[in-house]
């Protein structure tokens, strides 16, 4: 619920800012590339870290169970 409120607040703020400044937003290529590629890089890093933990046996599953359910 908090994320929806944050998204609504950001959207409303950007809409208001667009009404105040109708000219196109100018930005640098560095910022554009950062915004485009950083989510993919962060997701890849997260997947690599979690896959190395699984390979090392550091999973979240409990080993205390004597009986497996099928």
Image: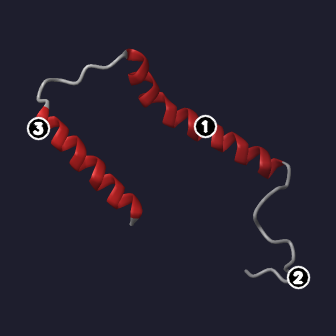
Residue at image location 84% in from the left, 83% down from the top? 67
Q: Quadrant of the N terminus?
A: bottom left
Using the rendered view, name the quadrant where residue 5 is placed.
bottom left
Question: Residue 51's spot in the image, x, y percent?
Answer: 73, 46
Q: Is residue 49 left or right of residue 56?
A: left
Question: Residue 43's spot in the image, x, y percent?
Answer: 57, 41
- Secondary structure, mark 3, is helix
Q: Is residue 29 left or right of residue 47?
A: left
Please determine whether, in this image, residue 16 is positioned above or below residue 22: below
Residue of label 2: 66
38 vs 5, nearest the viewer: 5
9 vs 57, nearest the viewer: 9
Q: Is residue 4 left or right of residue 55?
A: left
Q: Residue 29 shows which numbered tag?
A: none
Of badges 2 and 1, the one in the foreground is: 1
- Distance between the alpha carbons at the discs numbered 3 and 2: 64 Å
- Distance between the alpha carbons at the discs numbered 1 and 3: 37 Å
Q: Earlier in the sequence, mark 1 or mark 3?
A: 3
Q: Is residue 54 left or right of residue 19?
A: right
Residue of label 1: 44
Q: Residue 19 shows which numbered tag?
A: 3
Assess disc 1: are there few (<14), some (14-19) or many (≥20) residues with their C-alpha within 10 Å of its C-alpha.
few
Q: Residue furthest front?
A: 20
Question: Residue 46's spot in the image, x, y percent?
Answer: 64, 43
Labels 3 & 2 near each other (Cβ < 8 A) = no
Q: Earlier in the sequence, mark 2 or mark 1?
A: 1
């Amino acid at each position: 619920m908090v994320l929806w409120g944050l998204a609504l607040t950001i959207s409303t703020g950007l809409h208001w800012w667009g009404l105040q400044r109708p000219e196109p937003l100018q930005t640098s290529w560095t910022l554009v590339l950062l915004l485009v590629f950083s989510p993919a890089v962060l997701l890849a890093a997260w997947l690599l870290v979690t896959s190395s933990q699984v390979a090392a046996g550091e999973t979240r599953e409990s080993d205390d169970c004597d009986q497996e359910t099928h």
